[in-house]
Image (tube, helix red, strand yellow):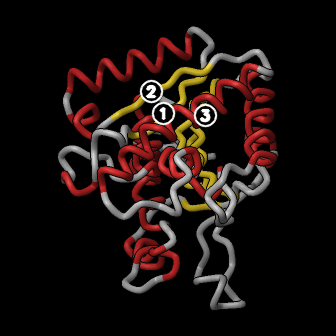
Amino acid sequence: MRIVVKLGTSTLTHSTGRLNIRRVETLCKTLSDLKNAGHEIVLVTSGAIGMGVGKLQLPGRPADMPTKQAAAAVGQCELMYVYDKLFSEYHHTVAQVLLTGADVRDERRRENMRNTLLRLLELQAIPVVNENDAVVTDEIGVHNTIGENDTLSAIVAELTEAELLILLSDIDGLYTADPHRDPDARLIERVEEITPALEALAGGSGSALGTGGMATKLSAAKLATAAGADMIIANGRNPELLYQIAAGEPVGTRFIAKGRES
């Protein structure tokens, strides 16, 4: 399969904001093994600002935009160094691809981006994709930014014609209610259609699930499934669950691609 894996900051770092070394090492080892088994891997990664905060020894995540962008510029180098070092141990080559909203929306740039990603896969490299936070900000507006990496990963899945998109986060999947508040909340293992009721569950005003990013994950699921890719939301605390996912075992919440019966 061609698989796009999106890594959230909570998967990559400890609560201190520093890199979770054991988890990231396990993640890169597992992805390398899946690639050795014949799968094509594209990585969409968060974490540049957090890595930059640590590298610059800042007291915490900066509030002002220029410092956020400076931290992203420093952190992106550190992030790629880590990926390059760890994947190289298993004889795989990584490639950095930094995108902006303008790259996605402009037809010619979008085609160039698609061609680059597909050629990297042909060359057996692992594209590592992130939004270029050093030059774009949410304040600039929707015409210039993608906004968050759930959406970016769905766009990448569409561009690369991936069969599967996996969002690794700090949650096990989509629940019928907030599992932190409702002991009867149950995991929804399979979603055939994203209904208004489902969207209301994830993104209602004041919803803990919504503030946790579930609304953006449902938006990503709409994009990915419309493009022909299944999407899975799973907990990234144990990266080895990627083996189970690749084997087709039920993990997290799976959104079924449009027109696909299985």
Tell me the quarter of the image containing the N terminus. top right
- Residue nearer the viewer, 9 or 188: 9
Q: Residue at x 62, y 28 (%)?
A: 81
Q: Nearer the viewer, residue 109 or 183?
A: 109
Which residue does the image show at 76% across and 27% down from the upper left?
Answer: 32
Q: Which residue is mark 1?
A: 129
Q: Residue at x 61, y 58 (%)?
A: 17
Q: Are marks 2 and 1 in contact (CB under 8 Å)?
A: yes
Label 1 is placed on what type of residue? Val
Point out the tag, 3 or 1, that comes first from the N-terminus: 3
- Residue 106 is left or right of residue 74, and the answer is left
Please state which amino acid type lies under the numbered disc 3: Ile
Separation of marks 2 and 3 at Cα, in angstroms:
16 Å
Mark 2 or 3: the one toward you: 2
Location of residue 243 by image quarter = top right
Give the secondary structure at mark 3. Answer: strand
| CB-based contact (under 8 Å), mark 2 and mark 3 | no
Give the structural element (helix, strand or loop) at label 1: strand
Dot placed on the residue nearer the N-terminal end, 2 or 1: 2
| Residue 79, position as x, y percentages in the image | 58, 36
The picture places residue 212, in percent across and down from the top left corner, at 51, 71
Nearer to us of marks 3 and 1 is 1
The numbered dot on residue 97 is 2
Q: Is residue 149 above or below residue 216?
A: above
Residue ranking furthest to the top:
123
Give 148 or 62, whichever is nearer the viewer: 62
Res 3 label: 3
Q: CA distance from mark 2 to mark 1?
A: 5 Å
